Amino acid sequence: MKRLLTLVFTVLLSANLLALEDKKIVLLAGRPSHGPGDHEFNAGCMLLQKCLENMPGVQVEVHKMGWPKDISTLDTADAILIYADGGNGHPAIQADRMKLIDRLAEKGVGIGCAHYGVEVPKGDPGEAMHRWIGGYYEHQFSVNPMWSPNFLSFPKHPVTRGVKPFKVKDEWYFNMRWRSDMGGITPILTASPTDDVRDGPYVWPKGPYPHIKEDKGRKETMMWVRERPDGGRGFGFTGGHHHVNWGNDDFRKVVLNALLWIAKVEVPPQGVVSFISEEDLSKNLDPKGK
């Protein structure tokens, strides 16, 4: 009887320890890009890591230059964020990496992409983004103006917990190329661009594009989440050009909440509460000169 009780206790203890095992979030910070204060991928990821360092049940790794030196770390990831330059240089579409991320996604690993990291070429890379997060920035279909959307209301979703209305100027992309079925996609940050925003100029190419001007008055989505059929989750966030914006509590909170959500960590009722100082914002910046 004593041996049986010991065995039961051991099994229960092992189950509890397994249940308490930390969820692992991997942040892939892209190569240095743009001028000082813009596209500060490493500094931005380090801030996100700092904000989650006291979150129970979570560990966060940051890898610079867009990809881990030892890719085996991705095998134990519960969620991956790609905050890096995109287009043809997107770190996830080099060599056989799309196949690797497909395998991880099939296991239920969450995938997030931020700012330029939501842009890939159409074709196979675009289809991969449709699988992972539901939509992507397509060159000369989507647009990238500098503007200040007014985020006034949010859907009821774990990612919006504790997020209050906010407005910051950034290179907020919109008019994503969505999956044709919009399967599992929920818009999170939406706002209506003014006519002046639609009329351009955009950052590059300057435009304007007739199809963007024709949709005047329409609400656009600047952040979204997706629940995938494989059980995994994903999100896209088009802000993140200006590093200083991570100092805005709600801008930061909606991304922190999303990281927990794609890692399948319960988002607190008031969202992730974090504090960032001016000194914090000045740390880990890439050496870009003046």
Image: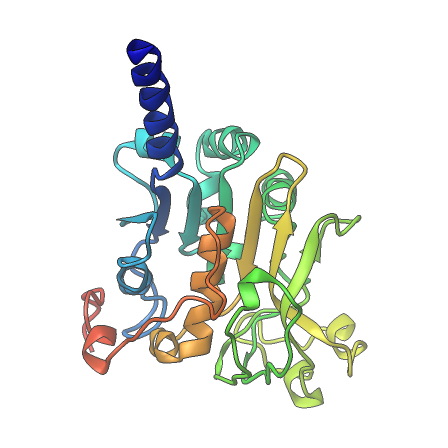
In front of the other: 211 or 180: 180
- 44 to the left or right of 181: left
Residue 222 visible in the current orientation: yes
- 87 to the left or right of 154: left
Residue at 78 percent across and 49 percent down: it is 180
Residue 136 visible in the current orientation: no
On the image, which quarter does residue 74 sit in?
top left
In the image, residue 217 lies at what x, y percent? 78, 83
- 68 to the left or right of 102: left
Residue at 46 percent across and 67 percent down: it is 271
Quadrant of the frame with the C terminus: bottom left
Quadrant of the frame with the N terminus: top left
In the image, residue 157 lies at what x, y percent? 62, 63
On the image, which quarter does residue 94 sit in?
top left
Up-down: is 179 above or below 192? above
In front of the other: 100 or 105: 105
In front of the other: 208 or 177: 177
On the image, which quarter does residue 32 sit in?
bottom left
- 93 to the left or right of 129: left
In the image, residue 256 lies at what x, y percent? 42, 62
Up-down: is 154 above or below 166? above
Up-down: is 85 above or below 14? below
Residue at 54 percent across and 85 percent down: it is 148
Residue at 57 percent across and 40 percent down: it is 232
